[in-house]
Each structure stands twice: as C-alpha cells, then as structure tokens.
Image (cartoon, helix red, strand yellow):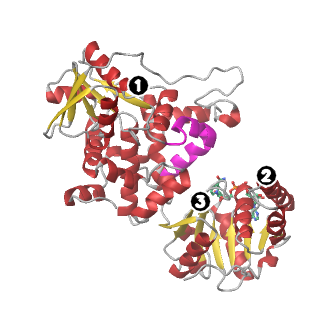
Amino acid sequence: MAALNRRAIVAVVGAGSMGAGIAQVAAAAGHTTLLFDMSPAAVDRAIQGIRKGLDRLVSRAVMTPQARDELLQRIKPVASLEELADARLVVEAIVEELSVKQSLFTGLEKICSPDTILASNTSSLSITALAAALARPGNLVGMHFFNPAPVMQLVEVVSGITTDATAAQTVFDTAAAWNKYPVHARSTPGFIVNRVARPFYAEALRLLEEGAADCATIDALLREAGGFRMGPFELMDLIGQDVNYAVTCSVFDAFHQDKRFLPSLIQRELVDGGLLGRKSGRGFYDYSLSAEQPLPCATDAKKAPSAIRIVGSLGVAEPLVSLWRQAGIAVTRTWGDANILRAGEALIALSDGRSATQRSADTGEANTVLFDLAFDYTAASRIALASSDRASVKAVDDAVGLFQAAGKTVSLIDDAPGLVVMRTVCMLANEGSDAVLQQVCDAAAVDTAMQRGVNYPLGPLAWADRINPALVLKVLSNLQQAYGIDRYRPSQLLRRKVAAGVNFH
Ligand code: NAI
C-alpha cells in the first residue's frame, strides 16, 4: 500500500480546533484541502486561526512567507457537502456524537466515489459502530490526531471489525507522508493513548486520596524523578477536570466497569464543584493572581554516612553508586541477591511494591527505608523516600543524607506501597502489556503512542524492560496484595515475559 498521492484531494469536515489543525497538516503536505463546517463562520475562524499560527512561524523564520501563502491557498473553504465529491480522503472532526457522525458518513458515502476513504478523528467512539450504517463499511478508518494536530506527532490509525486492511494501511502511509508517527490500533475503548495513560492520573489521585503526599510533591516527583513533562495534577488542571473525568468514566464504562479504570472520588468532587482547573481558575491548584503556589515537600539537609555497603545490585538504580563515590562516600559491595544497601543505621532498597513497613515486617529489618524509581538516576533532581513506621529517626536521616549527597532533593512521603514513580510506571506498563495481549496493537506501537502522543520520556514497555519485567511483576503483585483489589492484577502477557525470561522488545 502507498500513501495518497500528493495531488489527491483531501477534505476535512468540522472546522473546530481539531479540524483546523488537520486541514493545516494536509495542506502542509501538499494536498488541496477542502474545509467544510455546518457553520460557515467556523470555517472563517479556522482559516484565520491557521493564518495566525503560520504568521508566527514566518516571524520566527521557521517558514517563508511564500510557503505560508501557498499553504493557505491550498485550503479551500466549501459551503456544501456535495462539493467534497472529488475527495480521496475525508477526515471528519465534528461533534463527538455517534448518530451525528453516522449520518455525516452515510451522506458522504452517497456523494463521494466508492473508493474514497472516510476517516474519523473520534477519540472515544467505536469505529465498528460508526461504520455500521454504511453500505461500504470497509472504507471507514479511525484517524485519531492529538491536539494541537500540527504539533503533536502521533496519529492512531484505528481499525474496526469491518475496516478494510488496505484502507487502514493507506491512512497509515498517508499519515507517515504527512510527517506524523502513525500507529495501528484496533478499535477498543480509549484506543491506545487514552487507555494506557489512565494510570498516570489514577495512581496520583489514589496517592492523594491516601494522603501519601500532596499534589505539588507528587507532580514534582513525576517531573523531576519520572522525567514526565508535566505532573498529573497540573496536567489534569490543564486538560480540564471535566474532560479528564469524562474520558476516565467513558473508558471505565466501556470496559464494563473494570475496577482497573475506577474513576476517582476527589476528581468527581472537583467536577461537581465546578473546579475544572485552569479554565475555571481553580482545580487542584488555585490560579488566581493572589494565590500562593504550594511548594513540593523537601526534607531538611541531613548528614550523609561516610560509607555504605551494597549487597547485590541496585539494578536500574546502579548509576547512584557513581554519584555516591563522587561525593566521597566509601562504597563496598558484597555479592548476593538481597539487592539492598546499608548506610549508617538504615537498610535502603528500591521499592518492590511493598510498603517499607510491610517489608520491615517481612524481613525483620526495622530500619527499612525505600526509594523510588527515577527515569535517569544521574539526572534526576528529586527522589521520593518512604520509611518503615518502625524505623529510627537516625536511620531515616542517614537515608535522606545519602540521597542528598548524591545531589537529590529528597521528598519523604508517607509509606505508600510502590512509592510514586515506580507504581505509576509499573501500572502504565501493565496497561500497555494488556493492550498488546488483547491485540489492540503491538509493543512498539504502545511505546510510540505514549512518547509521540503524550510526550512520555520513554515508552512504558521499553521502561518495563529497563526496570526488569520481573521487578515490574513483583511491584504489581505486591500492590495487588497490599490493596487486595483487582486494579493491580498483573497482565498475563507480563507474566509470560517474566516466565520466559524475555523482554517486551
Ligand atoms: P469543536 O467543537 O472545536 O469543533 C467541532 C466543529 O464541528 C464545530 O465547528 C461544529 O460547527 C462542527 N460540526 C458539528 N456538527 C457538524 C456536522 N454535522 N457537520 C459539519 N460540521 C459540524 O471540536 P474539536 O475539539 O475540534 O473535536 C472534534 C472531534 O475531534 C471530536 O470527535 C473530538 O472527540 C475529536 N478529538 C478532539 C480532541 C481535542 O483535544 N479537542 C483530540 C482528538 C480528537
């Protein structure tokens, strides 16, 4: 299969924020792009908006005035659906309602040629359901762009049961020719991104509900240790609590209320109270000018022990050892499979999904202090620690001092199992693993989707490989044990990878 020829006419129906962006992308790729909206004013607004955006590129010398003018000339406003007859690809970005989209597609089917591909930018409706009313359901493909479409690189190419593989491949190749990163996905609730991303919000909400840490600390940990561009609370405030809550509820309901996607009571309370985030002036954070922004918690400076002894390996956290050596701390190592380190009174270990208190009860080591996962232990500026309820003050201080000596701001959080970054990343990987198991997409597509669609620093399955799938499974099993609920049940595919001793990639 090949991409649409650049001379092929593309049409976009719906000239709101997504339709305008998609029209810009198609026109930038050289296609004559017809733009239709039931409101002609929306088409005018869209073209003005595109022009404004392009003017900014010209003023920054990213685009020449000539290229801007040529691109704008390729976007042709049209006043009726009938004028879309010659389009080879029609991308729909109208209101998110099944019956309205269905009647648009049945109308288009009568107007366009039998081999015109009809694409929907829906983010939540079933492609199979959208195609149900069509005479040629094989021509209908999901083409899910992310907002803003000219900037975000991902396109999910979604196939329903009746979608023709050749039509899906043409959309895939066309998206690639438009300089996007397309991934194939089967039509299932949330497709890839809106499904796999759920734990990013859900684990943070759960930690907040349990009082493990406050919003500012959880956000700072996911940014500064996790390497995510934004923390979950600031991101939910940006997206809008109503929008984010609605996506969670729609995925939860679509999966027959699978507890894994259980919506949060705190978030519902914000929605019910109209505290929708930035757009309403207040969500998890207060955006009024007079409001003081809360600071993430940071533990006071403590003295680091002068020597530490590692038993076994710190695994993914090994880069810390060089930082400690650089700080003048003497490091000795004995080989073994304990994978812990002793520093002063403290026994320190990477989280395995148990709380520090549970781990100290299991091992008889009262002074257990656990540390969190980091995306890059050398670059991370912050790390979370949690101590056993039985740990001495001295043991906690020794652990805090040790991580401060490695240049980290330490956020000592309440003793939540799996800490913050570790449980979030393990749950993201678990969801990605289930998406692969359930044939939604392959492992490479999960990682591309999360990196290109929502800017994750690493795809969740590549991250699981980096952590070690066996540890990911252990974290999830321990979380499931700790909470006694189905939400943390490990994916069967993850279990198989661990049993076979292989990675996702
Ligand atoms: P929007 O509300 O900004 O724009 C929708 C446009 O469609 C409006 O201009 C409206 O006049 C027009 N319209 C409605 N019914 C129509 C019809 N029957 N025929 C012709 N035009 C019609 O919506 P937005 O945000 O651009 O979303 C459009 C679609 O894209 C939805 O399906 C949405 O779920 C999906 N989407 C939205 C994303 C976002 O972040 N906003 C991201 C990815 C997908």
- Residue sitting farthest toward the top: 393
Q: Which residues are magenta?
A: 228-251
503 vs 80: above or below? above
- Are the residues tagged 1 and 2 within 8 Å (C-beta)? no
266 vs 152: above or below? above
Q: Amino acid at mark 3?
A: Gln
- Are the residues tagged 1 and 3 within 8 Å (C-beta)? no
Mark positioned earlier in the residue sequence (1 or 3): 3
Mark positioned earlier in the residue sequence (1 or 2): 2
Residue 127 placed where, x, y %? 56, 68
- Asked whether 237 falls inside the magenta stretch, the response is yes
Residue 411 or residue 473, whichever sits in front: 411
- Write down which quadrant ligand 1 falls in: bottom right
- Which mark, by number, is residue 56? 2
Tag 1, which secondary structure? strand
- Which mark, by number, is residue 153? 3
Point 35% across, 34% down: residue: 372
The C terminus appears in which quarter of the rendering?
bottom left
Q: Which residue is mark 1?
A: 410
Q: Amino acid at mark 1?
A: Val
For the stretch drawn in magenta, the main secondary structure is: helix
